[in-house]
Amino acid sequence: QVIFAQDYVTLPITSGFNVDVIAENRPAVNYTTTSIDYIGVNNTLLSLSLPGATIGLPINGKINSQVNSTPFLPYQLKDYTTNNALKLTANNISGTLQVTNSDNFSEIYILATSGSGISNFSGRINFTDNTTQTINNTTVFDWFDGGDYAIRGVGRINRYDDLIENANSNPRLYQIKIDIEVLNRNKTIQNIEFTKTNSDSNLSIFAITGKRPINCQQPTNLNATVLNTTTATLSWTGANNINNYDV
């Protein structure tokens, strides 16, 4: 087994969500405001707290990414009882997510999905020193069958007939990586603007996580040998003969 020591931080989103697309109770129409796909199709996400649900998003809203390159990367969804996504439905429509954050990041990760086809977006990261960084045009897969998913197989529910659909490994929420430019890695993010750049689909954004820059020298040859359910042996090679690391 391999140990990963990246330092990930979830960013609390204080404003900008405009829809509730996660049903935590029945009837689903009373516990959501819209669907993931087009109105008229009426499918949306659900929580495992919904009576009778055997599939769904975690009750506490905590998701650990399933992308192999970022093991243990966490996301925190907004409370299911309130607006919990930024939904953009038309070409050139924009929205801004305000965050509370005192960290600096080398990368950020957006948790998003798209209904009724793929979505594209561009955007801008605004820092507290009034500087900005452009987000280039980015694709988010349809919530069925796309790659780089952070979580999948969470099911969906029809808002009007309460029918829960277990679609095997679907629906999916995807992980979008955005590199922070080197000159911005000592800055603090204030908010992030998103602009949808295509029509005929629905983009939903749920959460943001950042990766702190690595400021110390990294060890190599990280390994773990599991001895039993509570014990493991850890080993590594210190960088430049440095062997005093916090675990």
Image (spheres, helix red, strand yellow):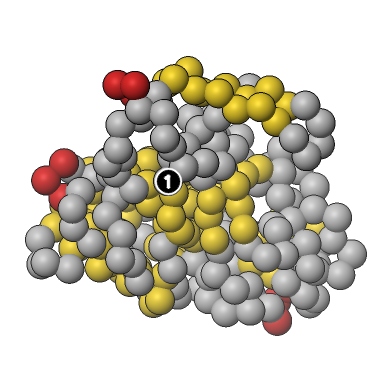
**Of the pair 137 and 234, the residue shown nearer to us:** 234
Q: Label 1 belongs to which residue? A: 7
Q: From what the image shows, is residue 26 above or below residue 158? A: below
Q: Where does the image place residue 159, in percent across and percent down from the top left?
A: 71, 69
Q: To which quarter of the image does residue 176 belong?
A: top left
Residue type at mark 1 is Asp
5 vs 183, nearest the viewer: 5
Quarter of the figure with residue 100: bottom left
| Residue displayed at 70% across by 31% down | 232
* Residue at position x 44%, y 20% in the image: 237
Q: Which quadrant of the rendered structure holds the N terminus?
A: top right
Q: Is residue 108 above or below residue 101?
A: above
Furthest residue to the right? Answer: 52
Residue 226 position (above or below residue 86): above
Vertical order, 9 against 152 (above or below) = below
Q: Which of 51 and 163 is in front in this view?
A: 51
Q: Residues within 10 Å of mark 1 (few under 14, many from 20)?
A: few
